[in-house]
Amino acid sequence: MKHQENRSRPASLPDKQPPDASRLAAWLTPRRRRQWREYLTGYAMIAPAVLLIFVFGIFPVGFALYVSLHKWRLKRGDIIGLANYTDAIGPVAYLLVFGLGVGLLVWGILKIARLRTDSKRGGWPFLALNAPAILLAGAGLAFVRWTIVLLPHVLDIADKIRGVERTRALFIQLLGEAFSMEAVLAARVTMLWLILGAALAAALTLLRWPSPRTLQRQAELAVNWFLIGVAAILLGYVYGEMMAAYDLAVQSGEDPGFLAQFISIASGLILLFIGWKLWRRAEDQPSTPLFFLRLGAATLFIVGGWIMIGELPVVVAAGDPDLWVGLRATLFYALGTIPFQLGISIFLAVLLFQNLRGSQMFRVMFFMPYVTPVVASAAVFRQLFSNRQQAPVNAAMKALGLEPLQWLWEPKGVFQVMALKLGLENWPDWAAGPSLALAVIMTFSIWVFVGYNTVIYLAGLGNIPKDLGDAAEVDGASRWQVFRHITFPLLSPTTYFLTLISVIGTFKAFNHIWVMRLDAALGTTDTFSVVIFTEFFEKLRYGYASAMAFILFAIILALTLVNNKIQGARVFYG
């Protein structure tokens, strides 16, 4: 009986598992299960933060972009495309959007090419992972399209409830109708099908190549394919906008010269880029003739590019004069505050870092302007620099035998005012400098932020080993040499950080400027942010103000990238 039971036991054994299932079971060890559980727990923990960032960060920016493409005064008007941008900065808006599209396209292609090279080295399936990545990128674009189709119907609810009793049930009913519109349903179906296809393809590739790296590579490929899709949409859109503007100019009998200007400026920028590349690679040439040949070619490209972008001032002049005046005031404000803030701060930090009696009290005193409410301190400064004869600053000037000034009421440039005091009547406008009113605001900004920068520099000085300075002094170095060759280079990370936040802060500055500005200054104190605020809250041009806000965002982003490229490479971390 036992022998028969043993003979019949093989018949009751389970069937052999499929190869994929056995491979997955062999790969999914207890250690890897714990890793996956930790990954899922981590993603679940950050999911609320991601949701908050999307609701309060990404969506408002996207909605502002949506508003900037409309003629929007209190209520939504017609879609006018890039008209708000061209009204602000002229036809150069087409060039910027075109450049953004080309940049995203090149970035996405280069990243995908790099991933393809990595796949050959690492032996992972590049083509197989592209299928779910492309579907996922398409799902992202479909989600954006669904949102754009849905938004007008949701925004129209405000018009539908006008004149009727506003109840929660009515709002929910109208919201449901907005989600049930035929165009919205079609866009949603497309989005859901793409999401389902992407999820199915991702699951199949994960079963075939079960590894957390598989999901990471799919995500990287999806992001780059999404950027390529956005780039294609931008390039097609700006081409359509340019052709529409060209046809409209021809029909109305106007000069459609902006198209030729666009081609000239774009070609000039390309030539400048090629010339810059040739110039940088000239030093790598193995022989002197090739070196000079590269330099000559680079010079020709740079000169040709500079000539071709000569149309840029004409194109810029077609924009909003208030915007360019605001940008000019912002540049004056940034250039007149950042160097002084950093220079005074590092001097005070080095001074307070010494073992001086009362240094702690001075640290608190220097930091007080930063923690004081900015509106209150700006109001005090406004009274100090009043144009009255009895104002504190004018009274002090009279006591010193100097003539009182108009200060915040003075629209003339600082150098122009000085020239007039010296009897120079014909001082050129281009050399006038910032207005005296703006100079007072710059003084206030320096007074406020010097204390903050000083505290940051003190923290940086505390991280520098004291032994380095002591060793240099033993070798005969003076205090200035220690500061120049040891302290200052080791403070470069702190200087880089303060420069970065100062550039961003000066271009976003608003509160104290709004408190201290006066109509008598004739707009010479209105920085970019003030111009945007005026367009939005006083002129109620929501679409135009949103477009200007995105232009300011592009300027800040460009300055940040330039700062990272120039100063970031010179940071010394020890």
Image (cartoon, helix red, strand yellow):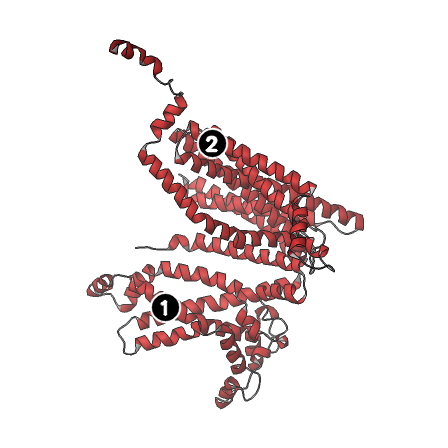
- Disc 2/disc 1 C-alpha distance (Å): 53 Å
Asked whether disc 2 touches disc 1, contact meaning CB atoms under 8 Å apart, the reply is: no
The percent coordinates of residue 51 (x first, y second) are 50, 50
Residue 239, quarter of the rendered image: top right
In the orientation shown, which residue stands out farthest toward the left? 474
Q: Is residue 395 visible?
A: yes
Tell me the quarter of the image containing the N terminus. Answer: top left
Q: Which circle marks residue 139 in the picture?
A: none
The type of residue carrying mark 2 is: Ala
Q: Is residue 434 visible?
A: no
- Residue at 33% in and 64% down: 459
- Residue at 55% in and 85% down: 404
The percent coordinates of residue 182 (x first, y second) are 69, 41
Tell me the quarter of the image containing the C terminus. Answer: bottom left
Mark 1: secondary structure? helix
Position above or below: 332 against 61: below
| Residue to which mark 1 is pinned | 455
The percent coordinates of residue 165 (x first, y second) are 71, 60
| Residue to which mark 2 is pinned | 203
The percent coordinates of residue 139 (x first, y second) are 56, 38
Q: Nearer the viewer, residue 120 or 37?
A: 37
